[in-house]
Image (tube, grey):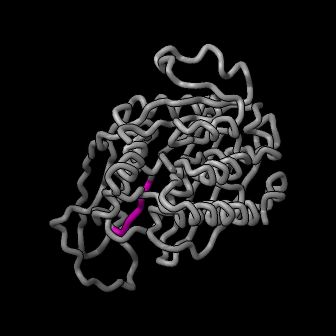
């Protein structure tokens, strides 16, 4: 196989985005073989840059019968992700599955059984793990530059908008938690570097036309003591920092859309003395009786990569035998945490998905 002949099912914004990403990042290793959508209008007036050599199908069964298709990438409505992925794997083809992978752990285990029966065929699209600002914040955190990490704050705000498409309808597992939640919970788990010991959550609908959620606050506490606070907002007209990592010796901070990551940390030349507290009154100026600390500020460039870098990892797995970095058990934990968030928040419209 010289190239992976891929097909996309679901030609909405995400499906078209998959094709654009592949053409941008790995067109030397992928070739568009087919597109599929049950809506006839989605199969008309397709972008000219896609060429004309690909086939068009109106059902997944028709697509899977095409022996010229090696891989199917799934970009349909949420509740169809797992059933379609199972059918793709059972057909013997490679499968890329959009998030949310599944609405609950019970469904996720069905996919796990199928994936284990067809090893090396499933790729989970947690693509925002490869975003430059997240990757750089994680790299700086792991370097120890801010000491022992205590709190991680992740605030993701989509544009303030009273959405009224299917994504706002809970019966379709719509809402901001199912849309952005898998990405940001996955990032929070990477920052925690520890199994989750406790979860607190509040999920609510504020301005959405549908009954789906558009504002959530989630607090995850790791067994190692770290705390990650996640805020997902479609009802915040003035968002603040996107990432903030607070350590014992400083802070890593990233503003939305920033080109660089900012760090303020203790000067490395400072040696912290072994001091004892004083029982007398504190000085009039806030500080310490016995030492003066100095800080430095530094900006760090983002790595030269982008969100769709995951396609390079998929190609490396298939052609070069380099394992895809997103493991099934990691995706399972994202689903488990999301299900627990729904349960603990008591958000009624999503409770039917708690098993």
Q: Nearer the viewer, residue 22 or 337?
A: 22
**Image coordinates for residue 189, horizontal then vertical, percent:** 50, 63
* Residue 247 position by quadrant: bottom left
Q: Residue at x 48, y 30 (%)?
A: 32
Q: Nearer the viewer, residue 265 or 4?
A: 4
* Residue 324 position by quadrant: bottom left
- Badge count: 0
Name the side, left or right, on which 84 lies relative to 279: right
Magenta residues, as a range? 244-248
**Image coordinates for residue 226, horizontal then vertical, percent:** 48, 71
Q: Residue at x 21, y 61 (%)?
A: 267
Q: Nearer the viewer, residue 63 or 132?
A: 63
Name the side, left or right, on which 142 lies relative to 103: left
For the N terminus, the image quarter is top left
**Image coordinates for residue 46, horizontal then vertical, percent:** 58, 17
Name the side, left or right, on which 186 lies relative to 136: right
Q: Main secondary structure of the magenta part?
A: strand
In this view, 199 is above or below 12: below
| One can see residue 231 in this view | no
Q: Residue at x 59, y 29 (%)?
A: 35
């Amino acid at each position: 196989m010289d190239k992976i002949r891929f097909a996309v099912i679901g030609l909405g914004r995400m499906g078209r985005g998959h094709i654009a990403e592949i053409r941008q990042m790995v067109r030397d290793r992928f070739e568009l073989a087919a597109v599929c959508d049950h809506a006839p209008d989605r199969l008309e007036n397709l972008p000219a840059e896609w060429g004309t050599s690909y086939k068009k199908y109106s059902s997944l069964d028709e697509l899977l019968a095409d022996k010229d298709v090696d891989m199917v990438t799934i970009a349909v409505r949420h509740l169809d992700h797992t059933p379609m992925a199972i059918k793709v794997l059972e057909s013997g083809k490679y499968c890329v599955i959009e998030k949310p992978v599944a609405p609950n752990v019970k469904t996720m285990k069905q996919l796990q059984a199928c994936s284990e029966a067809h090893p090396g065929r499933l790729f989970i699209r947690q693509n925002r793990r490869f975003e430059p600002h997240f990757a750089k914040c994680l790299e700086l955190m792991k370097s120890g530059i801010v000491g022992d990490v205590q709190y991680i704050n992740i605030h993701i705000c989509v544009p303030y908008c009273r959405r009224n498409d299917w994504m706002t309808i809970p019966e379709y597992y719509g809402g901001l938690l199912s849309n952005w939640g898998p990405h940001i919970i996955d990032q929070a788990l990477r920052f925690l570097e520890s199994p989750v010991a406790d979860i607190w959550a509040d999920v609510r609908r504020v301005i959405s036309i549908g009954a789906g959620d558009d504002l959530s606050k989630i607090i995850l506490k790791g067994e190692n003591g770290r705390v990650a606070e996640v805020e997902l907002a479609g009802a915040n007209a003035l968002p603040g920092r996107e990432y903030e990592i607070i350590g014992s010796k400083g802070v890593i901070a990233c503003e939305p859309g920033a080109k660089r990551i900012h760090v303020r940390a203790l000067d490395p030349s400072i040696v912290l003395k072994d001091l004892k507290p004083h029982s007398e009154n504190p000085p009039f100026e806030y500080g310490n009786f016995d030492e003066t600390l100095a800080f430095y500020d530094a900006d760090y460039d983002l790595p030269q990569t982008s969100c769709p870098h995951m396609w390079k990892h998929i190609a490396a797995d298939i052609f070069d035998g380099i394992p895809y970095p997103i493991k099934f058990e990691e995706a399972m934990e994202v689903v488990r945490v999301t299900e627990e968030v729904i349960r603990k928040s008591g958000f009624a419209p999503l409770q039917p998905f708690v098993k």
